[in-house]
Image: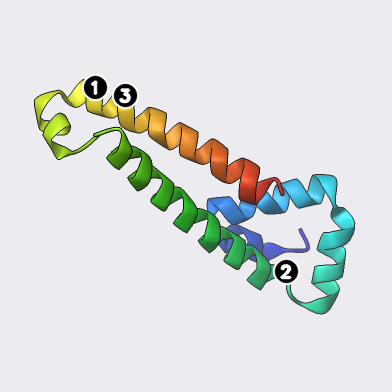
Amino acid sequence: MKDEFVKNIGVWGQRHYAYLKKHSPTVINVMRMKGTLEQYLKDIDKDAKDMFDKLVKQLADSEGINEELKSANEIDWIRSINSIRNRAEEIVLSEVIYN
């Protein structure tokens, strides 16, 4: 594999790399030649992770999913957090990774 560093990039950066590789291989080749691909993927990974974390917190706060619910009904809390994480992931994928 030409880009050995990709395995050291976070999951969001790897997903974006896979998307680019499939849909815009020319973009990857240009960035390889310029030497900017690794930093670009690291930046995408960081931005996507930050966005995901922020979205999870905002959605949990807006829906009243907190430590009180966790201690009162752990199963409902897990179900709610998983739903929030799935929605946040879809938002990040559509707005950052597949863009």
Quarter of the image that includes the N terminus = bottom right
Mark 1, residue position: 76
Residue furthest bottom as drawn: 34
Q: Residue at x 86, y 54 (%)?
A: 25
The amino acid at mark 2 is: Leu
The amino acid at mark 1 is: Asp
Disc marking residue 37: 2
Query: How far from the left and from the top, in percent, is residue 46?
Result: 52, 62
Q: Residue at x 64, y 60 (%)?
A: 6
Can you say whether 39 is above or below 44 in the image?
Answer: below
Q: Residue at x 63, y 51 (%)?
A: 96
Q: Residue at x 57, y 61 (%)?
A: 9
Mark 3, residue position: 79
Quadrant of res 38:
bottom right
The amino acid at mark 3 is: Arg
Residue furthest right as drawn: 26
Tell me which label, 1 or 2, sits earlier in the chain. 2
- The residues tagged by marks 1 and 2 sit, at their Cα atoms, a distance apart of 42 Å
Q: Secondary structure at mark 2?
A: helix
Decide: marks 1, 3 in contact (CB < 8 A)? yes
- The residues tagged by marks 1 and 3 sit, at their Cα atoms, a distance apart of 5 Å
How many C-alpha atoms fall within 10 Å of the one at disc 2: few (<14), some, or many (≥20)? many
Tell me which label, 3 or 2, sits earlier in the chain. 2
Is residue 28 shown left or right of residue 69?
right
How many C-alpha atoms fall within 10 Å of the one at disc 1: few (<14), some, or many (≥20)? few
